[in-house]
Amino acid sequence: IQTLSGPVRIERLSDSDSGIIELKLDRPEAKNAIGKEMLRRLQNAIATIDNDSSANVVVVSSSVPKVFCAGADLKERKLMSASEVQQFVNSLRSTFSSLEALSVPTVAVIEGAALGGGLEMALSCDLRVCGEESTFSLPETGLAIIPGAGGTQRLPRIVGRSAAKELIFTGRRISGKEAVSMGLVNYCVPAGEAHHKALQIARDINQKGPLAIRMAKQAINKGLEVDMPSALDAEEECYEQLLGTQDRLEGLAAFAEKRKPSCAPL
Ligand code: CO8
């Protein structure tokens, strides 16, 4: 994989973890706030991962202490015209949609602040793990706007409409413990241990049949957008794609032989 440098980096783990890709945010001077340049780098990184058929799982984290991402770059926004802001928000929205649409699972690691667009980026990932000292908020109504990069849609789908409405109407900052209690994150661990926990999950996923994981993600995501009969059709379509694979036969053989399956890369 091409390793991108600068405020958005991609790194591939080695040996048996080589299916795990790390996407790291690293813009310390602005607490990882997303301006035009950062957004362009993020788009490139997502496209690079999307084109890499040997990627099995992506861990999205920050290299900046005590912050995941402070959201949109408010200093840059002050200098933008209304039409530039509109263009930027559209671009942010489509970037997060392409992050969500990656065929492989994504795990966001939050240690510190995930605010505004920063939280919306984490919501675009499949799983979230945070450290206890993390804080989460969609403060946009306090800036007289609404979350515009998927927050009003993804948050209620994750935590339910009532909890999402309270968080969006008030902009209240919540802790990691509250985030896990409402299902906003999958795990809340002691501060500093979120990356380790996310890697454990990523390794677990990386051991499974790579096509099966892709099909599971596709079936879940497609199914949640449609009615139940169509959702079950979506599951069937995904299931059928796995019937002829070598990995499926290997899974059955490994079970019979009481050993771990060894899946072929895609
Ligand atoms: N944009 C630009 N610069 C930022 C941002 C930001 N969002 N957040 C922090 N910075 C800068 C600070 O201005 C400061 O710069 P300088 O050193 O030049 O003064 C530097 O980062 C360090 O910040 P702090 O001193 O505040 O660091 P702390 O560790 O004390 O606090 C926080 C870190 C908690 C992240 C704090 O900075 C904070 O609360 N930031 C504001 C976060 C916020 O309100 N985000 C929501 C933005 S709105 C949004 O994301 C909506 C997206 C869709 C709209 C898009 C329109 C273009």
Image (spheres, rainbow, N blue to C red):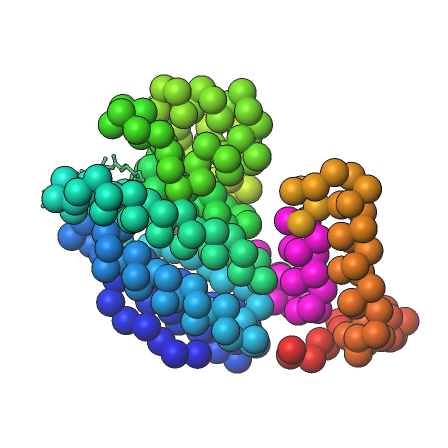
Q: Is residue 246 above or below residue 37?
A: below
| Left or right: 60 as drawn, with respect to 37 | right
Looking at the image, which residue sits at the far left?
79
Compare residues 108 and 35 and report the one nearer the observer.
35
Q: Residue at x 70, y 41 (%)?
A: 226
Q: Is residue 87 above or below residue 41?
A: above
Q: Do we see residue 84 in this rendering?
A: yes
x, y (%) of residue 219?
A: 71, 53
| Left or right: 210 as drawn, with respect to 27 | right
Q: Residue at x 76, y 45 (%)?
A: 231
Q: Which quadrant holds residue 264?
A: bottom right
x, y (%) of residue 258?
A: 85, 71
Q: Magenta segment, which residues?
A: 201-221
Compare residues 227 and 165 and report the one nearer the observer.
227
Q: Ligand 1 appears in which quadrant? A: top left
Q: Is residue 122 magenta?
A: no
x, y (%) of residue 111?
A: 36, 46
Q: Residue at x 37, y 62 (%)?
A: 43
Q: Residue at x 81, y 71 (%)?
A: 248
Compare residues 111 and 225 and report the one nearer the observer.
225
x, y (%) of residue 260?
A: 75, 71
Point out the image quarter for the N terminus: bottom left
Compare residues 209 and 77 and report the one nearer the observer.
77
Q: Is residue 218 magenta?
A: yes
